[in-house]
Amino acid sequence: MKVVAFNGSARKGGNTAEMIKRALAKLEAQGIETEMIELGGKKMHGCIACMKCAENKDRRCAVKNDFVNECIEAMDAADGILLASPTYFATITTEMSALIDRAGMVGLVNGSMFARKVGAAIVAARRGGAMQTFNTLNSFFFIQQMVVPGSRYWNMGFGREKGEVLKDEEGMQTMDILGENMAWLMHKLNA
C-alpha cells in the first residue's frame, strides 16, 4: 500500500511539511510506503472548464503544460491521499486549489477513480482560518467518495515561522494519531 501526500505550501520545509512528515512516519511504521510531493514552485493553474477530460476519459487532464497530470497519476496509483495546505486568507493555497479542481474533475468523469481510497486533510495555520481550510480539503474527499479517517482533534497545527509548529504538542499528537488511524483503516480496507 502507498500514501501520497501533497504539500500545498509555497514554503518548502515549512510547518506544513513538518506536519506531513509526522503523519507519514506513523504510516511508514505500519509498513505503508509514502511519498511527499511539493506543489510550491511548480507551474500549476486552475481548471479551464474545457471538459476534454470528460470526452477523453483517459484519467488525465487535457491541459498538459504544467505539473497537475503528474499529481493526478500519483493520486491514481496511491491507496491513500493526504492533502495539506497552510491557511492563506482563511482557505487553501492557489496551488492546492488548482490540484483539487483539476484532479477532482478528472476523477469524477473517469468513473469516480478515487472512490474508496483513503484521504485525509492536514492544515497549518498561524492563528485562524484553519477550519475553513480543513473543510475545503475534506470536501474534495467527500465528493470523490473517499473514506476519511479522523484523529482526536481537527488535523491542524499552529505556527508561523519555519519549524514553529513542532512546538504545538497537541498538533503533533494529532498528526501521530491521524497517521495511526489512516494506517489502521487502510489495513482494514485491504484485508
Image: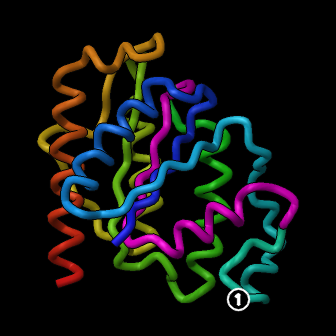
Q: Residues within 10 Å of mark 1 (few under 14, many from 20)?
A: some
Q: Residue 84 in magenta?
A: yes
Q: Residue 6: x and y, percent?
A: 52, 49
Q: Residue at (41%, 28%) from the top-left corner?
A: 124
Q: Residue 178: x and y, percent?
A: 22, 48
Q: Is 129 in front, or is 94?
A: 94
Please state if 53 lies on the left or on the right of 120 as rendered: right
Q: Residue 81 in magenta?
A: yes
Snapshot quadrant of residue 115: bottom left
Snapshot quadrant of residue 163: top left
Q: Residue at (44%, 31%) from the top-left corner?
A: 16
Q: Is residue 24 above or below residue 160?
A: below
Where is the C terminus found, in terms of image quarters?
bottom left
Q: Is residue 55 above or below residue 141?
A: below
Secondary-structure class at tag 1: loop
Please state if 182 lies on the left or on the right of 35 as rendered: left
Q: Which residue is mark 1?
A: 57
Which stretch is magenta?
A: 64-89
Where is the N terminus found, in terms of image quarters?
bottom left
Q: Residue 42: x and y, percent?
A: 74, 43
Q: Residue at (20%, 53%) from the top-left corner?
A: 29
Q: Is 125 in front, or is 40?
A: 40
Please state if 56 lies on the left or on the right of 97 as rendered: right
Q: Is 191 in front, or is 29?
A: 29
